[in-house]
Image (tube, grey):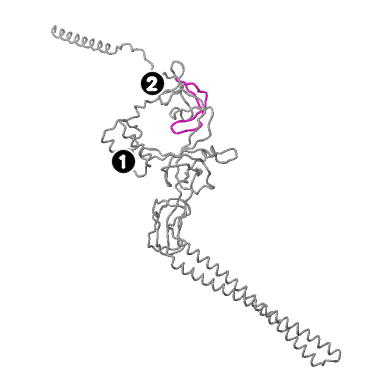
Amino acid sequence: MIGLFLAALTLGTLVWAVSLVAGAVQTRMADTSAAPPARERVFTVNVLTATSGTETPDLTSFGEVASRRMLELRAPEGGRVVALASGFEDGGDVRAGDVLVQLDPADAQSALDRALTDLADAQAEGRDAARSAVLAEDELAAAQEQADLRIRAAQRQADLAQRGVGTDAATEVADLATSAAQQAVLSRRQALAQGQARVDLAATREARARIALAEAQRRLDDTVLRAPFDGRLSATNVVEGRLVTANERLAELLDPDDLEVTFRLSNAQFARMLDAQGNILQADVRVTLDIAGVDLEARGAITRTSAATASGQTGRLVFAGLGPAAGFKPGDFVTVHVQEPALENVIRLPSAAVDAAGGVLLLGADDRLEAATVEVLRRVGDDVLVRGDIAGREVVQARSPLFGAGISVKPLRLGAPSEAAAMLELTEERRARLVAFVEENDRMPQAAKARVLAQLAAREVPAQVVERIESRMGG
């Protein structure tokens, strides 16, 4: 019994000890050390100073270059092509008055010869009619003179009869002779009228012959197609020996030096380009064409707008005449920059600095952010033109969902990027590949090609030029 009692006492003591150790361990694990004081997070932001001034918004659109003088050359008459100008090919330059196409003139020349013969016949008929009319006038004069003599003889015979010297028979004979003479005068007058009518008919026939001659001459002239103005040929589709029909399209002639660009503006953009009278402003435009890393540029001015809006189209179609435009050709798809009227007291900011509601973040005291609201006037590329009471304040360049009013930030004021960062040092293989691509480009003008090759020959090449050339190469 004593042994059992001791064993139970030992077991209880062991259980109590285990429970005591477990409680101590749990208490130790539950004890936590004091947390360090929390520190405010500080963000690094790029800031810029808002400067108020006068800005000229640059409205960007896309358009197509076209020639203001474009003419379809069509065959006035049908026939076989017997001769072509040496420069009658796509891209050939011609001068005003140059013979472009010569059709077979045999039929037209025969028609002209027949017209000349008909005119000669009509002229001969006219001369014959004129001579007949003169003879008829002379015959009428002679008949009239004879009638006058017969009348005087009849009067003398009547006087003799009244004095008892003549007889009634002689008087009747004299009266009959007078009547016959008057009848002869009437016949000669009728012959003269017929002669004059013949003269008129001959004149009409001659006029008709002259009209036929002029028409035959025009048809002969139409066998020769001449250039109406200085220009360049396009879409030629005729060769020597081909048989063409009347009014068949042979080529297009366009003036490469008289170019204009057509582009479309939205209704809101178009409304900003109107003056007080509702007419389109003759604003300056700048047209650029990207060719293998080189921007061809031309300048001009707005000239007019379309008279009506085409079905299914929106906005307004605007035309702008171009000045000297070396390298541009009709059909080029170009970028058009239009200068809008200048805006006073505006601030240019990056688009990322302004939210949809016009809110911006300003750098306040102790480098903490402050919220402000501005009026967005224009969006120009990656920038916006705003107006508000923030001139002279520093603005956060790019907003973030983590930024808000009261946030402490570390401002980073960036300077202008160095030119060295925009230059690349090319390997010989890469340089040779770029040079070969530029030399094989036929669309690039010689002046621009020489400028690009000079840049590629330098030890360091602008990174923008390299990137744009390789984008055209597909590399």
Q: Is residue 276 above or below residue 46?
A: below
Give the x, y percent position of residue 394.
46, 21
Instruction: Compare marks 2 and 1 and give the one earlier in the sequence.
Output: 2
Left or right, residue 418 beside residue 314: left
* Looking at the image, residue 306 lies above or below residue 457: below
Residue 247, horizontal then vertical, whole percent: 46, 61
Q: Mark 2 is on which residue type?
A: Thr
| Residue for point 43% across, 29% down | 352
Q: Please state the horizontal and vertical placement of residue 404, each as a whole percent of the image.
A: 44, 22
Above or below, 71 relative to 273: below
Indicate the secondary structure of the residue bearing disc 2: strand
Residue labelled with disc 1: 437
Q: Nearer the viewer, residue 203 or 380?
A: 203
The answer to whether residue 4 is left or right of residue 343 is: left
Which segment is the magenta one? 369-393
Front residue of this view, candidates 171 and 268: 171
In the rendered view, would you say 455 is above or below 69? above
On the rendered structure, is 375 left or right of 32? right
Q: Which residue is mark 2?
A: 44
The one of 96 and 56 positioned closer to us in this rendering: 96
Q: Is residue 418 magenta?
A: no
Query: Which kind of residue does numbered mark 1 sit on?
Result: Phe
Please say whether residue 386 is one of the residues in the magenta stretch. yes
| Residue 56, x across and y down, in percent | 50, 32
The residue at the point 33 percent across, 38 percent down is 471
